[in-house]
Image (cartoon, rainbow, N blue to C red):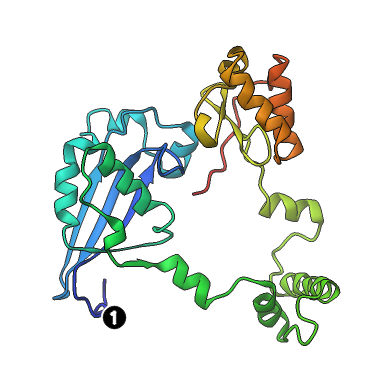
């Protein structure tokens, strides 16, 4: 930090980020934790922990952070260093980017699994840089029209026709502002709506993991599709629930086929993941 910290601090502020095995605060595990503890006197303490998550790190997660099972094999588990981490966070408020949605929840879950219930994030103040960004730099249609076209929606704001016309103007304005953007729809679709080859369905409700299709949501997260299909009671009930619920057609089709013992073709060996937190 090159400049004096611009926030008056009554307590230390722990600015932190986590790398993990996935994006579910409850089901996934921490791999790396980095913390910058900014003290009220302006000094900064820095700590990093690399931990063994005690579960296999999915290949799609490795593609994001580059940390492999081999690198953490001899590292302590979170439980081994939990008291050390808790001490470093002692008396701190919390800060991060999108931390309120993921990092804080995952860290608290790790403490709970280690038998520690005194972290209590709800008792700490929270500064989330993403929330500030989204509040001060809106990303809705009104803001886009103002930014790209220099005008407001006007009296007909958010009427369907007015919104459609404004959207068209924004697209034209974006193509004028960014000459490097593709000039055909398919290329734009590939650029901004990349299909993750590890997803079996577009929404990623089912994903490939180590050569098997697994469930990627809910209480069955991590369960192999073949195991569900082989379980005539609970597994079939879960698959039938998917077929009758408000999921996309391709998601329902995976469940319907599994009930018939029809499974997706294996993932090509050269496929590479697209994975976002």
Instruction: Please name whichever residue, 112 or 14, is drawn nearer the observer in this view of the structure.
Output: 112
Left-right relation of 233 to 20 = right
Residue 150 appearing in the image: yes
Left-right relation of 247 to 17 = right
Please determine whether, in this image, residue 101 is positioned above or below residue 229. Answer: below
Please count the marks in the image. Answer: 1
Q: Name the spot of residue 61 as percent of width and height, x first.
A: 45, 38
Left-right relation of 241 to 167 = left
Quadrant of the rendered image containing residue 255: top right
Instruction: Please name whichever residue, 75 or 2, is drawn nearer the observer in this view of the structure.
Output: 75
Residue 267 appearing in the image: no
Please determine whether, in this image, residue 253 is positioned above or below residue 169. Answer: above
What residue is at 26 percent from the left and 75 percent from the top? Answer: 2
Q: Name the spot of residue 212 as percent of width and height, x first.
A: 56, 21
Residue matched to label 1: 6
What residue is at 35 percent from the left and 49 percent from the top? Answer: 18
Q: Outermost residue, right direction?
A: 161
Q: Name the spot of residue 133 as percent of width and height, x first.
A: 48, 71
Please determine whether, in this image, residue 9 is positioned above or below residue 244. Answer: below
Element type at marker 1? loop
Quadrant of the rendered image containing residue 250: top right
- Position of the N terminus by quadrant: bottom left
Please determine whether, in this image, residue 234 is positioned above or below residue 64. Answer: above
Q: Name the spot of residue 227 as percent of width and height, x first.
A: 56, 16
What residue is at 29 percent from the left and 42 percent from the top? Answer: 110
Query: What crowding class fits label 1: few (fewer than 14 Cα within 10 Å), some (14-19), or many (20 or more)?
Result: few
């Amino acid at each position: 930090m090159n400049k004096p910290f611009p926030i008056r601090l009554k307590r230390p502020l722990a600015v932190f980020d986590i790398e993990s095995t996935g994006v579910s605060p409850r089901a996934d595990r921490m791999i790396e934790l980095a913390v910058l503890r900014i003290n009220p006197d302006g000094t900064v303490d820095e700590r990093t922990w690399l931990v063994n998550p005690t579960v296999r790190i999915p290949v799609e997660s490795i593609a994001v952070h580059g940390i492999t099972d081999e690198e953490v094999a001899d590292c302590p588990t979170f439980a081994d260093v939990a008291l050390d981490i808790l001490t470093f966070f002692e008396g701190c408020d919390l800060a991060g980017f999108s931390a309120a949605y993921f990092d804080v929840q995952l860290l608290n879950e790790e403490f709970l699994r280690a038998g520690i219930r005194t972290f209590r994030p709800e008792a700490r103040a929270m500064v989330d840089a993403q929330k500030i960004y989204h509040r001060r730099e809106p990303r809705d249609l009104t803001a886009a029209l103002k930014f790209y076209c220099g005008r407001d929606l006007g009296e007909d704001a958010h009427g369907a026709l007015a919104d459609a016309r404004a959207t068209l103007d924004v697209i034209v304005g974006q193509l004028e502002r960014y000459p490097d953007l593709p000039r055909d729809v398919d290329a734009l679709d590939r650029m901004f709506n990349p299909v993750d080859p590890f997803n079996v369905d577009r929404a990623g409700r089912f994903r490939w993991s180590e050569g098997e299709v697994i469930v990627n949501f809910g209480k069955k997260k991590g369960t192999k599709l073949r195991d569900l299909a082989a379980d005539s009671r609970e597994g079939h009930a879960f698959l039938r629930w998917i077929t009758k619920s408000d999921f996309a057609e391709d998601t329902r089709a995976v469940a319907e086929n599994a009930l018939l013992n029809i499974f997706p073709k294996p993932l090509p060996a050269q496929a590479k993941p697209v994975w976002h937190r």
